[in-house]
Image: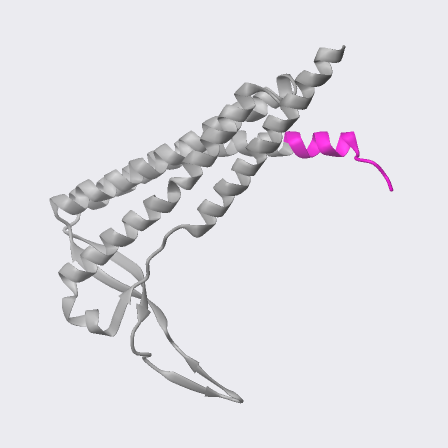
């Protein structure tokens, strides 16, 4: 069976490293654009578009099909809501919180990749930065849950008469939890590799 191709592995590593670098700098440009657009909407408009995913308690329609019945059990509601101080604060809070998490994830990934480039990947710095990366990715789960709660409150405030027809679709961010768990497993692998590396150095 052919062994690993160091040249291919090196190209994959450098490609991923440059993708992270591109994402790092692109994100700052996107922050500036997002803040500009959000400021224009929140401070110069009287209302704004709002949408949310909901689960229908009673299907709106049933579509007959050969051997099956297709039912619409989920929907996205759209409406215009007036802008108030609470929504202004909430909009900027969630934007800055999201960007803080994204910047933290990219910052630690850059540190991990630079550490791997300079020396062995089995170092305390790489392990620590990977742990931080997993932690910040996991924070996206409660972030999404908080966002779902806010959407539910907006729907309750502006469309209470329609609440009997659906319930809020709660986004708990399960994919982020899975990714964070995988990274934590990698942390254990790196820690084991560092221990083996120290044992080998002790025999030299």
Q: Position of residue 135 (x, y in %)?
A: 43, 35
* Residue 51, percent from left and from top: 28, 59
Q: Is residue 94 left or right of residue 23?
A: left
Colouring used for the render: one colour
Q: Which residue shows up at 71% across the image and 29% down it?
A: 10
Up the image or down, 20 lies above or below 87; here it is above
Boundaries of the magenta span: 1-14
Does 12 appear in magenta?
Answer: yes
Point out residue 28 in the picture as x, y percentages from the top left corner: 40, 31
Q: Is residue 68 left or right of residue 1?
A: left
Q: How many marks?
A: 0
Within the image, what quadrant is residue 44 found in? top left
Q: Is residue 121 above or below residue 50?
A: above
Residue 169 or residue 110, whichever sits in front = 169
Is 106 within the magenta? Answer: no
Above/below status of 76 relative to 66: above
Quarter of the N terminus within the rendering: top right
- Choose between 194 and 84: the one closer to the eye: 194
**Main secondary structure along the magenta-highlighted residues:** helix
Residue at 42% x, 41% y is 138
* Residue 180, position as x, y percentages in the image: 48, 40
x 37%, y 52%: residue: 172
State the residue at coordinates (53%, 20%).
125
Give the quadrant of the C terminus.
Answer: top right
């Amino acid at each position: 069976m052919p062994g690993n191709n160091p040249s291919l592995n090196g190209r994959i590593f450098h490609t991923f490293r440059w993708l992270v670098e591109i994402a790092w700098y692109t994100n700052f440009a996107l922050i500036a654009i997002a803040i500009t657009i959000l400021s224009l909407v929140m401070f110069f408009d009287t209302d704004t578009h709002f949408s949310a995913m909901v689960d229908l308690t009673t299907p709106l329609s049933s579509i007959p099909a050969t051997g099956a019945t297709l039912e619409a059990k989920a929907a996205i509601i759209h409406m215009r809501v007036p802008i108030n101080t609470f929504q202004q604060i909430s909009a900027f809070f969630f934007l800055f919180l999201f960007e803080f998490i994204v910047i933290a994830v990219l910052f630690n990934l850059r540190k991990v990749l630079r550490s791997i480039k300079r020396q062995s990947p089995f170092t305390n710095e790489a392990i620590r930065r990977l742990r931080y990366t997993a932690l910040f990715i996991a924070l996206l789960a409660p972030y999404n849950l908080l966002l779902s709660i806010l959407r539910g409150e907006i729907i309750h405030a502006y469309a209470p008469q329609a609440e009997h027809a659906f319930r809020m679709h709660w986004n708990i961010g399960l994919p982020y939890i899975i990714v964070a768990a995988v990274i934590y497993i990698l942390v254990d692998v790196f820690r084991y590799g560092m221990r083996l590396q120290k044992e080998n150095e002790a025999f030299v």
